[in-house]
Image (tube, rainbow, N blue to C red):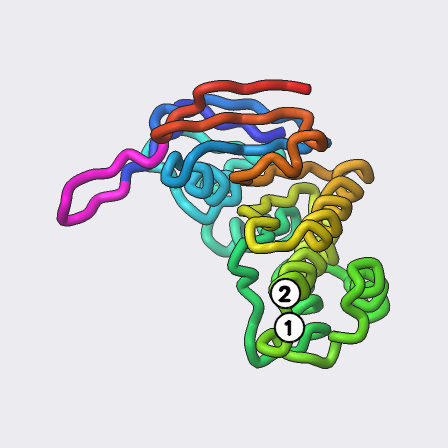
Amino acid sequence: MINIQDVTKIFSSKMGDVVALHELNMQIPDNKFVLIKGPSGCGKSTLLFTLGGLLKPSSGQVKVLGKEPFNMEEKERTAFLSSQVGFVFQSYHLIPYLTVLENILFSKNAGNKDVSEEQAQTLAEELNITDRLKHYPSELSIGEKQRVALARALIVKPELILADEPTGNLDPENTQVVLDHLRKFQQSGGSVVMVSHGNEADHLADCIISMKKGKITNIRTN
């Protein structure tokens, strides 16, 4: 369960304060595929990073999987997020000096999970990147990089995946591969919260949250 109450996030700059999130309230049950949609700058990614414990709100309460990450000590929060929450970023965040296999296995150390190279190879086969396991990120296509990032998130078997525009830079074929695996993860008992500009994942969503100017304007359940 994700539960946020009266969450506000304000960024301060020389030009003045910017309210990125304004008194948001939301509950998301477990085992759901949720989309967060809205125009650029509406607060979608800020909300996702807040749910993932990466961006502390200026005020309000955030509960994720029964825990309050911002009330934890940093070490405890890092351990919780690494083991229970998988992140898939639009910009991939792959480590350039590690091979594809090493990138996929990297999160096992942070998550303190019993993950094997065999599991990584199985995921790579499912995502059609087996022939890239010894390559480095600079040698990959955009679609391959995103599939590596997805494998890295999936391998620790988290309870929740947070995906920030994971198909934004992909062609239709790679978009479908990524969406199929996110759906498979959700159907196996996990939860997915995905930020999206487009409509390609609408048919998969149990719930679509619309945002505008830092506010939730509509929550539609399917």
Front-lying residue, 57 or 203: 203
Q: Quadrant of the C terminus?
A: top right
Left or right? Give the position of 56 relative to 86. left
Find residue 98 and report its image quarter: bottom right
SS category of the residue bearing label 1:
loop
Tell me which amino acid carries mark 1: Leu
Q: Position of residue 20 (x, y in %)?
A: 33, 36
Name, please, the residue furthest toward the front.
172
Identify the mark at residue 140; answer none if there is no mark: 1
Magenta stretch: give its range. Answer: 11-21
| Residue 71 in sight | no
User: In the picture shown, does residue 88 fall above or below 189?
Assistant: below
Q: Do the CB atoms of the residues marked 2 and 1 lie less than 8 Å apart?
A: yes
- Is 31 above or below relative to 173? above
What predominant SS class does the magenta segment belong to?
A: strand
Give how far apart the Cα atoms at labels 2 and 1 are: 6 Å
Magenta stretch: residue 150 in it?
Answer: no
Q: Which residue is mark 2?
A: 145
User: Relative to 93, does residue 88 appear above or below in the rendering?
Assistant: above
Q: Amino acid at mark 2?
A: Lys
